[in-house]
Image: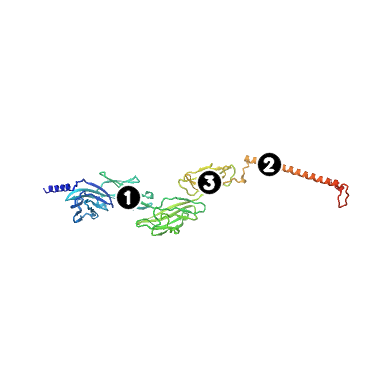
Amino acid sequence: MKEKLKRFSLCLLFSLTGLTLVSNKKIIAEVGKKISLPCAVSANGDITWNKDGTLFAKKSRMGITYGRVTGSERFNIASGGTNTLETANVQLSDSGTFTCAVAGAVVKTVELVVFEVSAEPSDTLITSENLKLSVKSSPAVKFEVSWLKDGGKIGDGVNLEVKNITIEQSGDYVCHIKMKDGVEERFSKTISVKGFKSSPAIVYMSGKKSVTLPFMFNFKVKESPLQGDIGVVEGDVKYLSNPHKTVQKLVVTSGAACWPLKCQPKMDPQDLNISITSPRSGLYRMEILLQIGGREKRLHRDVCVANLTVSTSHNDIVTEGNVTLLCGINCIDKDGRLCWRHTNRSYDICGPPGKDNLAKEITVLQETSGNWTCGVFTGENRLTSANLTLEIPLGFLDLSNSLFWVTVVAAVIVFLIIVTILTVIIARHRRVRRARYRAWLLENLHHHRRCECDYKGFAPQRLRQNI
């Protein structure tokens, strides 16, 4: 009789407060997040929350009292008549079946399933470290897991391992959980990877000009890190000759790094580029030791200083002879091509992508002589070039060439004609002079034919005899 009266009173309470009994509800939550378990009762009387049949928390006019369940003190029963059980920091141990009771009668049952998605060694990694993602819940919970990134599936199972992680693999890793009863939920884990940013691996030198080696990072390497962030321990740049030669060492202060001559002012905090005033072709390597938490990782990045050289196969160049144009570079991109090009662009040849030398055999003619250019191209973009002038020496004329002999004969004929004309002119000039001289003598003989002269005067007889 008392049990029937109790049920009647409870039904009367719900009819007066406008509440209805609701079915069980399942809530899936992630460790560390905020949750609210609904009671669906707006009564102002005593509200009792139980977990797995044990008192968890009770709200009365005297306030909230907690049971002996571990972790219950992190929860609160909301005021304002909603009576929801909530916490801002749910834990894995909070999983279980919660019931909300009014006047001793259960009005709401909520099943709470808490999952923990963890990342080892941490959410922030250094390039080339191994990442392990895992998800777990209470042993009684049955579920399936798949992992997604950038909208695509990358693995199945409670564990996911990414070895030698790169900066490009930073981002949100989604854990897709599917319960046996069909309930699904997704949790996202943001992973940040620190290290060298992508930058050109080859720089091209031109003569004796200085070059800048690009060493860029995706974090503020020049600034002291905050707690839990990544910092620098030491670092330097070496020229990889034999033996290795240190070019410059980093100055490190409280995890912030810079080059000795560029510590102030701080330009781009992610920029550790270094200028080489007298570069040599070959590999330069930057090594840097990074630290985060109790972990250290040594990274390195190589930059090649490329020098393009051109030459011919031999020095004996003759007309209509063959000569090989040689072009080489000490390092080249996998998509780069070496190309020989003539000034009139009618003699072009390119090598295959990634090949660091190119030879072109040509026949030495008037149209093939002149300036040749060997360049490094990616598509139509020329990265660097070097010139070669192909000249035909005058001392190496080909006597078997018919054009040569025609030229020689024509030159001889022209020379003979010029000599003949000059000879005729000179002979005629001499005859004219001789005739004038004789006329002068005869004229003098006529004027003085009767003149008798002493030994110092005019002697017509002697003159006549000379004539």
| Other-residue count near label 2 (Cα within 10 Å), few / some / many at <14 / 14–19 / ≥20 | few
Q: Are marks 3 and 2 in contact (CB under 8 Å)?
A: no
Q: Is mark 2 on a helix, strand or loop?
A: helix
Measured along the vertical axis of the image, is residue 139 above or below residue 407? Answer: below
| Amino acid under disc 2 | Val
Residue nearer the viewer, 414 or 93: 414
Q: Decide if residue 129 is in sight here.
A: no
Q: Position of residue 287 (x, y in %)?
A: 42, 55
Q: Label 2, label 1: how many angstroms apart (C-alpha)?
A: 95 Å
- Relative horizontal placement of residue 184, taking residue 360 as reference (left or right): left
- Relative horizontal placement of residue 383, taking residue 45 as reference (left or right): right
For image coordinates 85% across by 45% down, the residue present is 446
Colour pattern of the rendering: rainbow
Mark toward the start of the polypeptide (2 vs 1):
1
Q: Disc 1 marks which residue?
A: 189
- Relative horizontal placement of residue 124, taking residue 81 as reference (left or right): right
Question: Mark on residue 321?
Answer: none
| Amino acid under disc 1 | Lys
Mark toward the start of the polypeptide (1 vs 3):
1
Question: Mark on residue 414?
Answer: 2
For image coordinates 79% across by 45% down, the residue present is 436
Q: Label 1, label 3: how many angstroms apart (C-alpha)?
A: 54 Å
Q: Label 3, label 2: how many angstroms apart (C-alpha)?
A: 41 Å
Q: Position of residue 439 (x, y in %)?
A: 81, 45
Q: Disc 3 marks which residue?
A: 373
Q: Decide if residue 389 is in sight here.
A: yes
For image coordinates 32% across by 50% down, the residue present is 189
Q: What element carries label 3?
A: strand
Q: Is mark 1 on a helix, strand or loop?
A: strand
**Which residue extends farthest left?**
1
Mark toward the start of the polypeptide (3 vs 2):
3
**Which residue extends farthest bottom?**
253
